[in-house]
Amino acid sequence: MPIRNLFFVAAIFVFTSSVFAQTKLLRFPDIHGDRVVFSYGGDLWTTAANGGTAVRLTAHPGVETFPKFSPDGRWIAFTGQYDGDEQVYVMPAGGGEPRQLTFYPSRGPLAPRWGYDNQVYGWTRDGKIFFRSLRDSWSLPIARLFPIHPVPAGRQE
């Protein structure tokens, strides 16, 4: 292959890789005030609502999805898939150690049309997290919404 052709192929490769290097798989965004939280590459990230550099909040080998800000913006609830089981977790909005809130056996990997088990949907106005779960369904994938308080009884945060 002549040098000229090799140079042309290299130039096309550099051009296409720079065009496609943009991050395009940002999923499940939630906004509170001037902050956005989203899932990318199985981790949670946050950034300013008007753009800028994103900060990674989680780095566990498991997958974190469906982040939702609390009404006051201090907490983020999310569905974490650690050790193959999907559960509800909560963590400070600025980052920190996630705390597991649910301990129900997950149904395991589901068909895509059935969605996720223990999927965080949001927060109530009084500060409870509501999530979709199949925990009371033993034969058919019939999900219900459940509330859970992010702070255990007797504990102040």
Image (spheres, grey):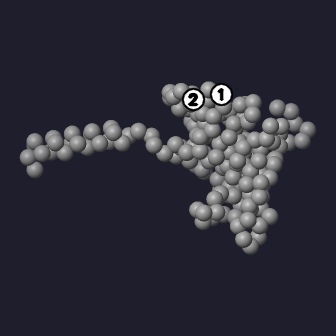
Q: Is residue 146 visible?
A: yes
What residue appears at the point 81 percent right and 47 percent down from the top-left corner?
148
In which image quadrant can residue 141 be found?
bottom right
Vertical position of residue 28 compared to residue 49: above or below: below
Query: In the image, residue 85 lies at what x, y percent?
Result: 68, 58
Question: Secondary structure beneath disc 2?
Answer: loop
Nearer to the camera, 1 or 107: 107
Q: Which mark is residue 33?
A: 1
Query: In the image, residue 64 lies at what x, y percent?
Result: 62, 47
- The crowding category of the residue bearing disc 1, from other C-alpha atoms within 10 Å (few below 14, some 14 to 19, many at least 20), is few
Q: Is residue 105 visible?
A: no
What residue appears at the point 79 percent right and 41 percent down from the top-left corner?
124
Query: In the image, residue 92 lies at what x, y percent?
Result: 71, 34
Query: In the image, residue 5 lies at what x, y percent?
Result: 12, 45
What residue appears at the point 60 percent right and 63 percent down from the top-left corner?
113
The answer to whether 9 appears left or right of 145 in the picture is left
What separation in Å lies between label 1 and label 2 (alpha carbons)? 8 Å
Mark 2 sits on what residue?
Answer: 49
- The crowding category of the residue bearing disc 2, from other C-alpha atoms within 10 Å (few below 14, some 14 to 19, many at least 20), is some
Q: Earlier in the sequence, mark 1 or mark 2?
A: 1
Q: Amino acid at mark 1?
A: Gly
Look at the numbered discs 1 and 2 and tell me whether their residues touch, using CB distance below 8 Å. yes
Q: Which mark is residue 75?
A: none
Q: Amino acid at mark 2?
A: Ala
What residue appears at the point 67 percent right and 49 percent down from the top-left corner?
79
